[in-house]
């Protein structure tokens, strides 16, 4: 999955575990882009630095998440 931020603030990326728990994975700088290995159907949470949800994304073939 590729995460691309157009935000002017950094964000945190979490995998949402099977019980809905946040599992920290990546810190993404403003204007950043990362590729994260995942499995189809896995859910990913993007938050601001205060932990507030920016978006939730479900992995699919060739997934790209813009925020």
Image (cartoon, helix red, strand yellow):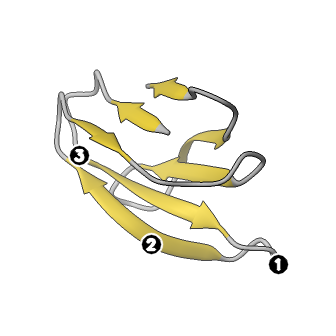
Question: Badges 1 and 3: C-beta atoms under 8 Å apart?
Answer: no
In the image, residue 23 above or below residue 42: below
Q: Is residue 8 left or right of residue 4?
A: left
Q: Is residue 24 above or below residue 38?
A: below
| Disc 2 target residue | 24
Marks 3/2 in contact by CB < 8 Å: the verdict is: no
Q: Position of residue 49 (x, y in %)?
A: 33, 57
Name the residue that disc number 1 marks. Answer: 19
In the picture, which quadrant includes the C terminus?
Answer: top left
Residue behind mark 3: 10
Count residues near mark 3 (Cα–Cα under 10 Å), then give few for <14, some for 14-19, many for 20+. Answer: some
The circle on residue 61 is none
The residue positioned 69% from the left and 77% from the top of the image is 21
Q: Position of residue 11 (x, y in %)?
A: 32, 48
Q: Residue at x 27, y 58 (%)?
A: 27
Q: Identify the element where label 1 is drawn.
A: loop
């Amino acid at each position: 999955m590729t995460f691309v931020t157009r935000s002017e603030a950094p964000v945190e990326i979490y995998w949402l575990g099977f019980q809905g728990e946040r599992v920290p994975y990546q810190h993404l700088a403003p204007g950043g882009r990362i590729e994260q290995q995942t499995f189809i159907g896995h859910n990913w949470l993007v938050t601001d630095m205060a932990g507030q949800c920016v978006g939730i994304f479900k992995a699919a073939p060739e997934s790209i998440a813009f925020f």
